[in-house]
Amino acid sequence: MTTDTPRPPPRPRFFGAWGPRELKGLFWQVLVVAIVVGVVGFLWSNTVTNLSARRITTGFAFLGREAGMPIADSLLAYNPRDTYLWAFVVGVGNTLRVAVIGIVLATILGTLIGISRLSANWLLSRLAAVYVETLRDIPLLLQLLFWYVLMQALPAARAAWRPIDGVFLSNRGLILPAIPLGPPQLWVLGTAAVGLAVVYLIRRWLVAQQMRDGKLRPVWPFAVSFILALPVLVSILLRVSWTIEWPQLRGFNFVGGLTLAPEYFALLIALVTYTSAFIAEIVRSGIQSVPRGQWDAANALGLRRSFMLRQIILPQALRVIVPPMTSQYLNLTKNSSLAVAIGYQDVVSIANTTLNQTGQAIEAIALIMAVFLTISLSISFFMNWYNSRIALVER
């Protein structure tokens, strides 16, 4: 008895697998791409022709020339004799200085306000609701101008407010005590950061071991060794001095300490309070998305409400909170460009000054777009990575 072995089906040709609908879709896609390329090419050719007719040079060679512009408040060291390229770098540093600190503070404040809206305390929940509804309905630019005018109305340096010892608030800004950071101090802080990463990896390994044999292994000895003991040892070996620099009033201004300029302080307050109102609603909706049974089970076990929120409710709510939270982080970063309205010299303000001095409008705008695109993509990449880490995995 012979059995006929089935023959494999014939391999279709490339275009044989395409039906009329697929070919029609391909045609329209190619047509749209061709139109877009043609429009971009026409605009580029027209721009180059007009710039040549007006004898305006193009290119980024101007970045190597001396800037000559003053930058009053900068995170990085700057001198007017530096190049335009370094001025842009300083502007990027000022933008990141607002964005990173603003994201951290807005997240903390928004989370607290969002939890307060769900509080059983009637007064606390109503105050949180008023905070959210008021700040969300007022344009950010008006809030920014309000805080800036309020900072300008503060008393002069000689009559500065002192909420606590060593802290001054005046029309010069917020002046705080500071620890001078040099190369030795940075080495110690870098050691602590590396120790934190090592402890994170060790903790993951210990959790994997516990899942394998069920034995609980404490991580605190490694944390004490790598995060506390190792930096202290490096500090002793390098003879690092951790002295606090206290601000002092000399003449009409303060000397020493950390000074937050009025422009920066007003911008930071406006961005944090405005964005935290939206984050509060995201947190509230995320908490309310957790099934009621989780609350009832935790209450039946007699768990404290703070422990319940921290260990049971919020970890589940993060899967709902993180995606819209990413949009708020991006909005805060892009809204920092409103700093030009109050004179804070971020990357947009420095690019505008460069444009006026050099006439390189296209290049300056392209640099601004590249900076914000890079920052936004970095935030999106990190948040998407974190979202994938906490996502539920179906078995």
Image (cartoon, rainbow, N blue to C red):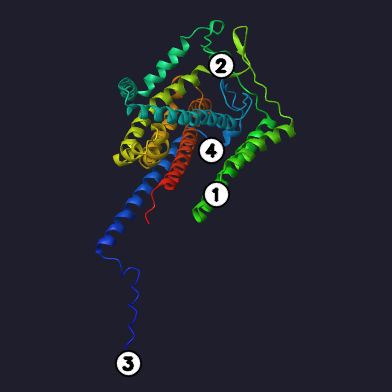
- The secondary element bearing badge 3 is classed as loop
Write down the residue under mark 3. Answer: 2
Q: Please tell me the numbered disc located at residue 206.
A: 1
Compare marks 4 and 1 and give the one earlier in the sequence.
Answer: 4
User: Are the two marked residues, 2 and 1, in contact with CB atoms closer than 8 angstroms?
Assistant: no
Compare marks 2 and 3 and give the one earlier in the sequence.
Answer: 3
Q: What residue type is labelled 3?
A: Thr
Between 75 and 372, the one nearer to me in the picture? 75
Task: State whether residue 330 appears in this view.
Answer: no
Compare marks 2 and 1 and give the one earlier in the sequence.
Answer: 2
- The secondary element bearing badge 1 is classed as helix
Is 261 drawn above or below residue 114 in the view shown? above
How many neighbours does mark 2 have within 10 angstroms: few (below 14), some (14-19), or many (20 or more)?
A: many
Compare marks 1 and 3 and give the one earlier in the sequence.
Answer: 3
Q: Nearer the viewer, mark 2 or mark 1?
A: 1
Q: Residue at x 43, y 16 (%)?
A: 147
How many neighbours does mark 1 have within 10 angstroms: few (below 14), some (14-19), or many (20 or more)?
A: some
Along the horizontal axis of the image, is 237 left or right of 331? right
Q: Nearer the viewer, mark 4 or mark 3?
A: 3
Write down the residue under mark 4. Answer: 59
Q: Which amino acid does label 4 sit on?
A: Gly
Write down the residue under mark 2. Answer: 175
